[in-house]
Amino acid sequence: MKAIQYTAFGTRPKVVEVDRPSPGPGQVLLRITASGLCHSDEFVMSMPEEGYPYPMPMTLGHEPAGIVEELGEGAVGVSVGDAVIVYGCWGCGVCETCADGSENLCLTGMVSPGLGVDGAMAEYMVVDSVRHLVPIGDLDPVRAASLTDAALTPYQAIKKVLPRLVGGSTTVVIGAGGLGHVAIQLLRELTPTRVVALDIGQEKLDFAKENGAHEALTSDASAAATIKELTGGRGATVVLDFVGADVTGELAVACAGVGSAIVVVGAGLGGVKVGLTSAPYDISVQTSLWGRRKELLELVEMAKRGQIKIHTTTYSIDDGEKAYDDMHAGRITGRAVVVP
């Protein structure tokens, strides 16, 4: 079968031929119907060889949608032919955080398809357990695949600060791309907050407005001052940073108000520096990693009701290398999805 793999350090992904996998006891074989690309893939491919934690080569793709093709011995709870998406946080299932449903925070170490085991950029993939499958019914798999990360990640980040997002509040979204444009939709659907999106380039600013942002500003040195003006000098109530670089961390602090919250979601190898005299008083800063399976179930129901819609650009698996090149170059609006 065809697969898109990271095959050697310092190289780009390649379309290769590999053997079709078979499910072991308790596992499930999926015929992949759609697989979303993510900047986390770029992060993995930028890691140095020394200390690299994953197998090589490795099939990429941690946003899978598929059809149940075959059940391993003892696998129950789904049937051949079921349409599903895959919850990507594969924890041990027995530690304290897994017992609480937070496999994304597994204390013994989490792996994911495409981030530790072979993923969904292929015609077939093996899922380790039925508990990581979420039925989608008649949802379009191209739209549904990226619910697993592009929607789940901002959804959890927003739920962390939801009590703050009351009438009269302002939320700044830094980065209106694959995750950010879904965050804007979720904020509009779940809260009365005013949403201000920050990004670079008129096309991305227009895209943010199309997805519900009340304001869309160029992410530059003047953005924080503009936000202070919009809020009568108070600053943002919440800042969601979907980039995670040092420069966006500085911008987040500059936009924030007294008693505000910053949530860092992006894996841009940077962060937020705060101190008593270098940030608004009583500010809180936290990170947010992926989300819980229960939250993915909630998002599926929202998608079925038309409350969120992920903007996608599709590629065939033969064009998978181009898809990754387009993402790397910033040519993707929303989410890129490979359709085998």
Image (cartoon, helix red, strand yellow):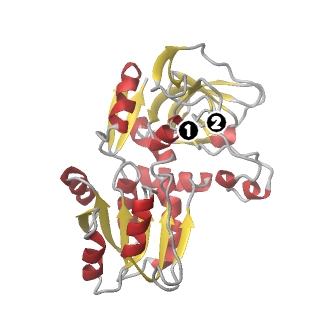
Asked if residue 14 lies left or right of residue 134, the reply is left
Residue at the spot 57% in from the left edge and 34% down from the top edge: 114
Instruction: Provide the secondary structure element on which disc 2 rests.
Output: loop
Q: Is residue 140 above or below residue 234?
A: above
Residue 183 % position (x, y) = 40, 59
Q: Quadrant of residue 314?
A: top left
Q: Which mark is residue 47?
A: 1
The relative height of residue 75 versus residue 144 in the rendered view (above or below) is above
Left or right, 21 with reference to 36? right
- In percent of the image, x 46 and y 28: which residue is there? 33
Q: Nearer the viewer, residue 283 or 52?
A: 52
Residue 340 visible? The answer is yes
Q: Is residue 180 left or right of residue 78?
A: left
- Direction from residue 311 to residue 8 in the image, left or right: right
User: What is the quadrant of the C terminus in the image?
Assistant: top left
Res 137 visible: no
- C-beta proximity under 8 Å, tags 1 and 2: yes
Q: Which residue corresponds to mark 2?
A: 52
Q: Say what secondary structure mark 1 lies in.
A: loop
Which residue is at the front of the view, 115 or 121?
115
Instruction: Say whether disc 1 or disc 2 marks the residue closer to the N-terminus.
Output: 1
Measuring from the top left, give residue 196's x and y in whole percent: 30, 68
**Label 1, label 2: how many angstroms apart (C-alpha)?**
7 Å
Residue at screen point 40% across, 36% down: 142
User: What's under tag 2, amino acid-wise?
Assistant: Tyr
Viewer-closest of 213 and 219? 219
Where residue 318 appears, x then y in whole percent? 39, 18
Mark 1: give few (<14), some (14-19) or many (20+) Cα within 10 Å: few
Q: Position of residue 82 (x, y in %)?
A: 56, 32
